[in-house]
Image: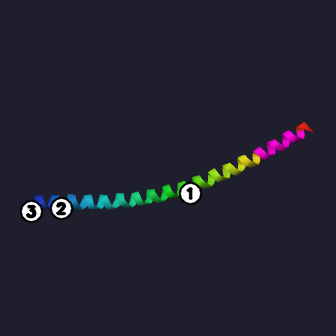
Amino acid sequence: MQASFSGLEQRVETLINECRRLSSENQSLKSEQQSLLSEKTQLQEKNRLACNRLEKIVEKLRLLEDQ
């Protein structure tokens, strides 16, 4: 009976440790996800600004071409 409890206790301890490890990994992944979302937002804004500049340059070239 004692061996049964000992084995069960060890399995519970293993599950607790695995739960802690997964919780830590989950927290790390959430942090990384937030960082990547922030980077994505910044890159989208840079892309939008670059597109606007490019459109202005194209428009200026068309105006010069028409002259």
Magenta span includes 62: yes
Whole-angstrom CA distance, mark 1 to mark 3, is 54 Å
Image location (x, y in percent) of residue 31:
47, 60
Q: What stretch is highlighted in magenta?
A: 55-64
Tell me, for residue 9, which label it has, or none: 2
> Which residue is painted at 85% across and 41% down in the image?
61
N-terminal label among 1 and 2: 2
Q: In which quarter of the image is residue 37?
A: bottom right
Observer-nearest residue: 16 or 38? 38
The residue that disc 1 covers is 38
Q: What residue type is labelled 3?
A: Gln
Relative to 29, is 49 on the left or the right? right
Amino acid residing under circle 1: Ser
Residue beneath disc 3? 2
Q: Mark 2 and mark 3: span between their CA atoms? A: 10 Å
Which badge, 2 or 3, is on the more N-terminal residue? 3
Residue at image position (65%, 53%) is: 45
**Outermost residue to the top:** 66
